[in-house]
Amino acid sequence: MFRNSYVGNYSLQSTGALASSMWGWHSEVGLHILRLHCAGVFDKFPRLKLIIGHFGEMMPFMLQRIHNNEARMGERKRPFKEVWDENIWITTSSVWSLDPMRCILGNTKIDHILYSVDYPFSSNEAGLKWFKELEGSGLLTKDQLEMVAHKNAEKLLKISL
């Protein structure tokens, strides 16, 4: 049912949490993005656009390490940071903390950050509470808040709200 790397001397309930929303989901998605890069997918399809959730599935926190070790993968037409900047958008997806946002603002283009709630796993009310906290934090200008709230999604998805 769960990969052995998540099984341990704890309850099945703990294993489930560890393997999914607590850690496993995020690390697995990040790993899959890196696998796509290793396989040359972004070189073959340079206009490919991916949206990944939960503030980038741990990747923003590891971008510098990825960059520092990327030469070990062999040649790529584009470094991963370029792929990150041009091919990947990230959503907030119920990570209701300003700490990840502080990190992301340092290494992710503002027009690649999308607000989302992750319903049904998180409520719209929780998302609104966090967004108001973000607004009051001073981390973003009014224009940047609008970009994250809806303008970036409108542009990426070619929709009007």
Image (cartoon, rainbow, N blue to C red):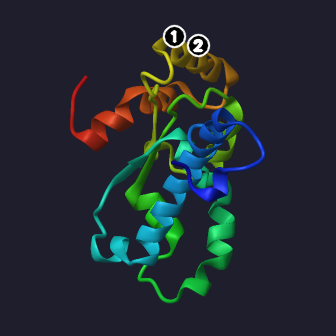
Whether residue 107 appears in this view of the structure is no
Q: Residue furthest toward the top? A: 125
Quarter of the image for residue 161 reads: top left
The amino acid on which the numbered mark 1 sits, given as a three-letter code, is: Glu
Q: Secondary structure at mark 2?
A: helix
- In the image, residue 112 sits, relative to residue 71, either above or below, namely above
State which mark lies toward you, 2 or 1: 1
Residue at image location 65% in from the left, 58% down from the top:
5
Residue at image location 64% in from the left, 18% down from the top:
133
Residue at mark 2: 129
Q: Is residue 117 left or right of residue 65?
A: left
Whether residue 145 appears in this view of the structure is yes
Residue at mark 1: 125
Quarter of the image for residue 83 reads: bottom left
Q: Is residue 49 left or right of residue 141?
A: left
Q: Are marks 2 and 1 in contact (CB under 8 Å)?
A: yes
What is the crowding at mark 2: few (fewer than 14 residues within 10 Å), some, or many (at least 20)?
Answer: few
Q: Which mark is residue 108?
A: none
